Image: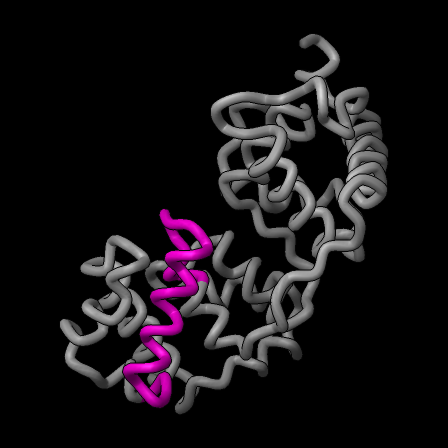
Amino acid sequence: MNPLMNKLAQRAVRIHERLLEFYGEPIWRNPLPGIDELVSTILSQNTNDINRDRAFEALRAKFTTWEVVRDAETQAVIEAIRPAGLANQKGPRIQQVLKAITAERGDLDISFLKEYSVEEARAWLTKFNGVGPKTAAIVLCFSLNMPAFPVDTHVYRVTGRIGLRPANMTVEQAHPHLESLFPPETYYAAHLNLIRLGREICTARRANCEICPIRKLCDYGSTH
């Protein structure tokens, strides 16, 4: 690691530790099976958690298994997931992913990915249309307990303001970059606490630097 990256990595650890002091150890919901998490994350694209969960629960209530979702009339799936928005795109996308996984594996159990390296598992997931780096990282981190660092809109914005990544770095580039800065054992908590910071304090509309717990560690906060 070059000196600049080493310095950034040290700051990333301090930011993680300060957020732990401020927010505590975050606990997300109970882990879902891999295929459930994959579908849930596709539903989460371009919507909030409440609408994602409403759509996911409606889908599970209407169809007894993922195999039934896979083989259902597409319009029925679209209607079930309407609360998540973009249902006309997400419905066919979910079915296409379920069909593609079945065609390759013979079933919809993706727990075998735990036997892969993180990079192998990420590559396997992202080869399916509609499964990008963020979706893959969420499945790996939260369902399969593998060291991947998801970068959603909040994490991307906050890490840019803080100065943990170059301003012109893409979301796709931010995944391996942030994984190289944070120690793997911090990914889960760092991801969730950065999201909370982005939702409550370092918001898209305004960075509330005066109440931010990491202001002294932030490029933006130290000048505002």
* Residue 167 drawn at (x, y percent): 56, 23
Q: Residue furthest top?
A: 223
- The colour mode here is one colour
Which portion, as a residue range, is magenta?
41-67
Left of 69 or right of it: where is 157? right
Left of 20 or right of it: where is 128? left
Q: Foreground: 156 or 31?
A: 31
* Residue 70 drawn at (x, y percent): 28, 81
Which residue is painted at 24% across and 62% down in the image?
82
Which residue is painted at 55% across and 66% down in the image?
139
Any part of residue 120 in sight:
yes
Q: Residue 177: which quarter of the image? A: top right
Query: In the displayed structure, would residue 147 be above or below residue 73?
Result: above
* Residue 46 drawn at (x, y percent): 36, 47
Query: In the displayed structure, would residue 186 be above or below residue 76?
Result: above
Residue 42, magenta (yes or no) = yes
Question: Which quarter shows the C terminus?
Answer: top right
Which residue is painted at 79% across and 54% down in the image?
25
Query: In the displayed structure, would residue 220 be above or below residue 173?
Result: above
Q: Foreground: 61 or 102?
A: 61
Any part of residue 1 in sight:
no
Which residue is painted at 51% across and 52% down in the image?
134
* Residue 111 drawn at (x, y percent): 57, 81
Question: Which quarter shows the N terminus?
Answer: top right
Left of 66 or right of it: where is 206? right
Q: Foreground: 220 or 49?
A: 49
Q: Residue 99: which quarter of the image? A: bottom left
Magenta span main SS? helix
Residue 45, magenta (yes or no) = yes
